[in-house]
Image (cartoon, rainbow, N blue to C red):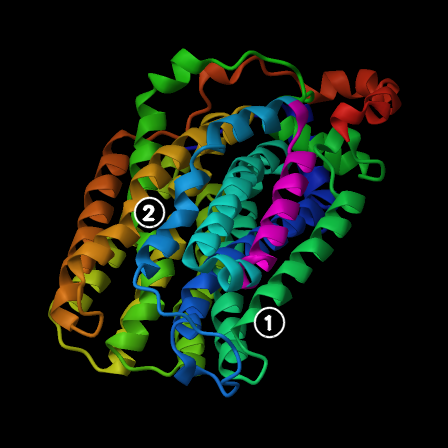
Amino acid sequence: MQDTEYTKEESSIIAQGQKVRFGARHVQFIFIFGCLTLSIAMRASFSIAIVAMTDNKTTQNHDVPTYSWNNTSVMLSSFFWSYIIFQVFAGYVAKKYGPKYLLLSGSIVNALSFSLIPVSAKYASSDGVIAMRVIQGLAQGSLFPCAHTVLGTWSPTEERSLMGMIVYSGISCGSVLSFIITGYVCSSWAGWPVSFYIFAVAGIVWCVLYFQFGYNSPAVHPSIKMEERRYIETSLGQSNTSEDVPVPWKAILTSKYFWSIVSANIGSAWGYAMMMTQIPTYLGKVMKFEISSNGVVSAIPYMAGAVTGFIFARLSDYLIGKNWLTTIQSRRTFQVLGSYGLVISFMILAYVSSTRTFAVVLLSLANIAYSATLVGYSVNHVDLSPRFAGILQGISNAISQAIAMFSPLIVHFLVKDRSDRLQWRAVFVIASGFYFICSTLYGFFSSATRQKWNGPSSSAPSNIQLRRSTFETLHSNPRYE
């Protein structure tokens, strides 16, 4: 069941590199985790803040402005209108020039546009807010392609599930922070505008730190241990990840394995867009949670998902490492079981009259199930092609988000009375259908075999001596910073 065969020399390099328990690769993954955490927080907190922005009974400070808007679902979906535009291009740019400066520029624009939402609401009403959300979506378009490029460049095959979970647990952690902090601030004397400034400032601080300590690849890191660098490059089978290999567009777009990932991504994106944008409204209007407790309660499912996600990641790597499952068997198992768990949770919410506590338990189970899929399809792009992982992610995310952006709009048209539990039933049923169909297709057609169109592999051991002599040349080139 072994997925990767190494020579004796390569096995020795792998063993030496694995002794570096905390190295340069971990620092890069922590940075990307932080970026995802803050970006998702700035994306998700609006779904809590908008409750306070349209109801002055949710705050202790009644001098904070509130607005009579009836297009809140449109405002929630506006982020996704532009989010899909930059995905494929971002993956290509990140692969060709490195993800660092693309990620930095997107993060700066994201933080600034988010901080301008209170001013835009004051002077341009809902149109101004929509404009800022559209800019935010455009800025965050580079987020996941860059994250996948970093995984494809820095993540050894032996650690891919765990490293992917470290990075993508930022999704859950960002949701937790946004719901708790935004809920508390909105209900306090500070008022809802302050919640925007808190996350924007944190985003700028992250940019300063990443500018100083972020690197595109092991080849350009000035202080990485040679054992770690050789380990990463040997595991990936490509010592020069910045090599300009043409993008095999036809092979990618005709690969059934890639389209199985797209299928799983569509189901996940639809369900997550619904959970992120609409669950706070569901808890507030149907379950009657106050704004401060709404934030905490909305965060509980994501906390459960964040914790269990690491368990699933370690379990996946353990099962693969022990040869009890192949990589693709692990990917399929966690993806399908996680998605079916979501289906069950949503269907119970749709058809069983539940108390507030039971609803939170079901949503927590849904997020636990969702976290299992993060070691399923989410890291499968890197399995197929470490070199083009960012481009694969850009394409699949663009397609899935183009479909998922209709999720908030479906709620707008189906749920006329936000406090009517029966009207929410169709929302949960539709999300369940997406998850079931899309993950079933993934289970039948996916693969974790590195594809021929990934490009030429190089033997890291034979090239290390040469690349030691050219290290300073590479590092002095701004393209590789």
In which quarter of the view is residue 82 placed?
top left
Give the prevailing secondary structure in the magenta stretch.
helix
Q: Nearer the viewer, mark 2 or mark 1?
A: 1
Magenta stretch, residue numbers: 97-118
Q: Are marks 2 and 1 in contact (CB under 8 Å)?
A: no
| Residue found 53% across the figure and 68% down from its top | 177
Q: Which residue is mark 1?
A: 194
Residue placed most toward the observer, 253 or 311: 253
Question: For the C terminus, which image quadrant?
Answer: top right
Any part of residue 337 in sight: no
* Residue 109 rendering spot, x and y as whole percentages: 62, 45
Residue placed most toward the observer, 307 or 449: 307
Q: Secondary structure at mark 2?
A: helix
* Residue 24 rendering spot, x and y as whole percentages: 74, 44
202 is higher (above) or lower (below) than 464: below
Report how far apart the C-alphas of labels 2 and 1 lie in the structure.
31 Å
Q: Earlier in the sequence, mark 2 or mark 1?
A: 1
In which quarter of the view is residue 106 placed?
top right
Residue 440 as seen in the image, left or right of residue 231: left
Q: Is 188 one of the magenta-colored residues?
A: no
Q: Which residue is mark 2?
A: 268
* Residue 357 rendering spot, x and y as whole percentages: 29, 82
| Residue found 53% across the figure and 85% down from its top | 61
* Badge 2 amino acid: Ser
Any part of residue 109 in sight: yes
35 is higher (above) or lower (below) than 222: below
Q: Label 1: few (<14), some or many (≥20) within 10 Å?
A: some
Residue 213 as seen in the image, left or right of residue 443: right
Q: Residue furthest bottom?
A: 60
Question: For the N terminus, which image quadrant?
Answer: top left
